[in-house]
Amino acid sequence: MKFTTIDLTPRIGSEIRTDRETMLDGSAAAEFRRLLEQRGVIVFREANLDDRQQVAFARTLGEVTQLGENSIFKVTLDKSVNRSAEYLKGTFFWHIDGTTDDVPNLASILSARKLSAAGGQTEFANTYAAYDDLPEPEKQYLAGLKVVHSLETSQRMINPAPTYAELKAWQRIAEKTHPLVWRHRSGRKSLVLGMTASHVEGMNLPEGRALLCRLTEWATQPQYVYRHEWRLGDLVVWDNTGTMHRVVPYPADSGRMMHRTTLVGEEALA
């Protein structure tokens, strides 16, 4: 069996129907990557891969990071399992992973191990399509702008009144300045936004933050968004270089558990 695809919305997201052998043997990996870049999100319903298989599948797509145990990071708000549980509350807001790094992650692979009875859906926004639909004069205006990204900015959305020790811990992660418009090697362009975006370099704070707010609203309109309603065993891959994502809030005591594998970034922002 090779695979078939079904577009989940017109602008973002495709479900891939295939068998486990095709996922793991790498024979369709180039086509999966092409679909991922074109569609932003690819979904394998009830794939039911175990951790070893998930990492093996990820390696057919790219280089795997060493984050987590054996490249599996457990995404849960259960503090007994994940010491970063408080930090993970930031995933309730739109973001791109790795914006405080020189090279953001290429993609992430997430599988559902336990679901919450309420909330917990994951939403993805296509920042390629959002850029493409901007009026040409605005594209020209945005072309030279740069945005400062910081961990502190994102954490203040969760904890607006940190202790001094908390603040200093956030500030140990250096700020990064990236173009507002990412000019990809493919020739396509996407917007670089999200909860880490602090301010626009060289622009007064009110004006710059208003611009970032307006663009985020633009990029997360319904026509650019796919909301994934999880089933146990689902495996979802998203292109971190051309989408934002967030999770719909869910109770901390729900037991919701996702296993994530991340692919190393291959392209610096330019």
Image (tube, rainbow, N blue to C red):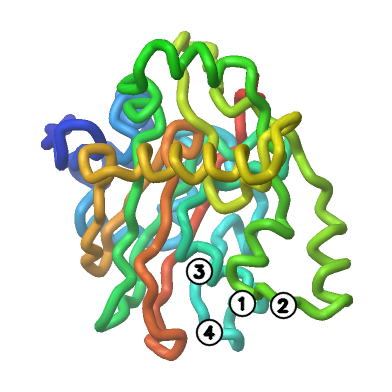
Q: Nearer the viewer, mark 3 or mark 1?
A: 1
**Does residue 112 show up?**
yes
Give the residue at mark 3. Answer: 75
Q: How far is the residue under mark 3 from the one under mark 1?
A: 11 Å
> Quick check: 141 left or right of 153?
left
Specify the amino acid type for callout 4. Answer: Asp
> Quick check: 216 left or right of 89?
left
Specify the amino acid type for callout 1. Answer: Glu
Specify the amino acid type for callout 2. Answer: Ala
Q: Earlier in the sequence, mark 1 or mark 2?
A: 1
Q: Are marks 2 and 3 in contact (CB under 8 Å)?
A: no
Q: Quadrant of the N terminus?
A: top left
Of 266 and 130, the residue lying toward us: 130
Specify the amino acid type for callout 3. Answer: Val
Q: Secondary structure at mark 3?
A: strand
Q: Look at 51% across and 52% down and name the residue there.
A: 261
**Does residue 27 show up?**
no
In the picture, the disc for residue 161 is: 2
